[in-house]
Image (spheres, rainbow, N blue to C red):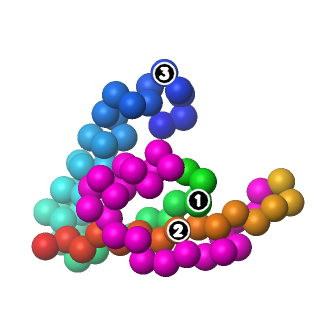
Amino acid sequence: IYAPEMRKIGYGSEALTLLITYCKDNLKLKSLFCRILGLNEASKRLFTGQKFIAKGIKKEGRLRDGNWEEEKYYELILN
């Protein structure tokens, strides 16, 4: 969520919960993946809070302002 005043009030968590439920129940997906930039602690907390498991790291995942940032990969197995 971009606007700072809209953060930490549950919108991201609610949206992710709805997305997971839709992917599982309607799309019948077996797993979900996401990529999170290494410095994005809020997103890491959001996804790990929904039981996503860290699966790997890409050291040069994204080029920003001439510097490479790592990306972390997460997966959620849907039962």
**Residue 39, position as x, y percentages in the image:** 60, 54
Which segment is the magenta one?
Answer: 41-64
How much space separates mark 2 and mark 1, taking CA atoms? Answer: 6 Å
User: Percent position (x, y) of residue 24?
Assistant: 18, 65
Mark found first going from the N terminus, 2 or 3:
3
Q: Is residue 33 above or below residue 12?
A: below
User: Where is residue 67 drawn, in percent x and y?
Assistant: 81, 61
| Label 3 CA crowd tier, 10 Å (few <14, some 14–19, many 20+) | few
What quarter of the picture does the C terminus occupy?
Answer: bottom left
Inter-mark Cα distance, 3 to 1: 22 Å
Question: What is the crowding at mark 2: few (fewer than 14 residues within 10 Å), some, or many (at least 20)?
Answer: many
Asked whether the residues under the numbered discs 3 and 1 touch, taking CB atoms below 8 Å apart as contact, a structural biologist would say no
Amino acid type, residue under disc 1 in the picture: Leu
Residue that badge 3 annotates: 5
Name the amino acid, label 3: Glu
Q: Nearer the viewer, residue 22 or 76?
A: 76
